[in-house]
Image: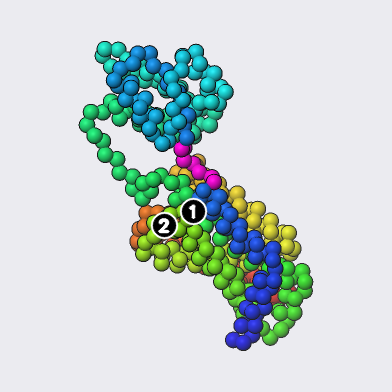
Amino acid sequence: MAIFGALVKKEALHILRDTRTMVITIFMPLVLLLLFGFAISTEVNDIRIAAVVEKHTCETRKILERFRVNEYFTFLGLVAPTETERLLRSGRADAVLFLRSDDANLKAQIMVDAANPTIAQTVTAYVGGVINKEEIKSPVLTYTLYNPQMKSSYNFVPGIMGMIFILICAIMTSVSIVREKENGTMNLLLVSPIRPATIILGKLVPYFLLSCVILAIMLFISYTLLGLPLSASIVNVVLLSFLYIILSLSFGLLVSTIADSQLTALIGSAVILMLPVIMLSGMIFPIDNMPVFLQGVSCIIPARWYISAMRKLMIQQLDAAYIFKEVMILTSMTIVLLVLSIRKFYSSSRK
């Protein structure tokens, strides 16, 4: 036990003395979380809209007044029909609304700048929603579950956590062990009476504790600055994150047993993981919209199951029973990675 404690202390001191590692591991998660929480948003908050009205009626005045007082719109006023294309081409307007009325009914037409299709679809939906309210005589009640304010940060937080832990934990572990190989200190440890399992645990424990600190900071920011709803499910959030951290550290350990240099370990744990995590984990792009082949590939990416479970816990605030499938898959992946990395480490230590 004293030897194990000495190994943990040695690795912890090495982490604390490495300023670059501390900066990357502590500040990068904060920057990404705040960046996606505040700066980068999929919400459309300032739609610049102009209107062309052929004939004013009570209905057209009500519609225009709704656009004037709606916080999501900046009403540019009435324009001539010949000015509409120039406004859209110059980028001064995002949409132009055409209102034509006769004695029978009111006709509306929306012209939108579709250079960005996603924004164009959102603008069209917003404008259509404002117009349709005038056409419906009876009130329509709409209930938005889990995220009533439609904040994009609610969607980004689980994704950022899934990306941060799989990248940082894997990078830290793999590079640390490979550095020991390059310096020759790993060979000294392997020929000593210390068991390889003790060496592995002594390496992993400090990084697990550091990851727990990162987890605490990220949860604090999520529940305070970003305003995610706090509930009893936070216990399950922490336990699930512990499992995911162990899985990420196991992957880093596996990379370290294969790589011969720090550069190889960095490429293996960062570059190879980053694109699949961002593209195929559901962090940004919905998995259901992907081709069937890519949906199958995404099943082997641990971040997919972690992000899915975290959204159920953090946003939907569901019980642990609803994430049973994700927990079983992550547990299986953790066991497989641990077994493979330990066996590989033992075989390499005997050479």
Compared to residue 320, the image places residue 198 above or below, namely below
**Side (left or right) of 328 relative to 63:** right
* Dots 2, 1 in contact, CB < 8 A: yes
Magenta span main SS: loop
Let me know if residue 55 appears in the view. yes
Residue drawn 53% across the image and 21% down it: 87
Identify the magenta region.
39-45
Tag 1 residue: 157
Residue drawn 26% across the image and 12% down it: 103
Q: Callout 1 environment at 10 Å: few (<14), some (14 to 19), or many (20+)?
A: many
| Residue 302 % position (x, y) | 52, 57
Q: Nearer the viewer, residue 325 or 126?
A: 126
Mark 2 and mark 1 lie on one chain; the one further toward the N terminus is 1
Compared to residue 127, the image places residue 265 above or below, namely below
Q: Nearer the viewer, residue 262 or 35?
A: 35
Q: Which mark is residue 314?
A: 2
Residue drawn 60% across the image and 62% down it: 26
Please check the rendered image and state whether residue 42 is part of the magenta-colored stretch, yes or no.
yes
Q: Quadrant of residue 346?
A: bottom right
| Residue 334 % position (x, y) | 52, 65
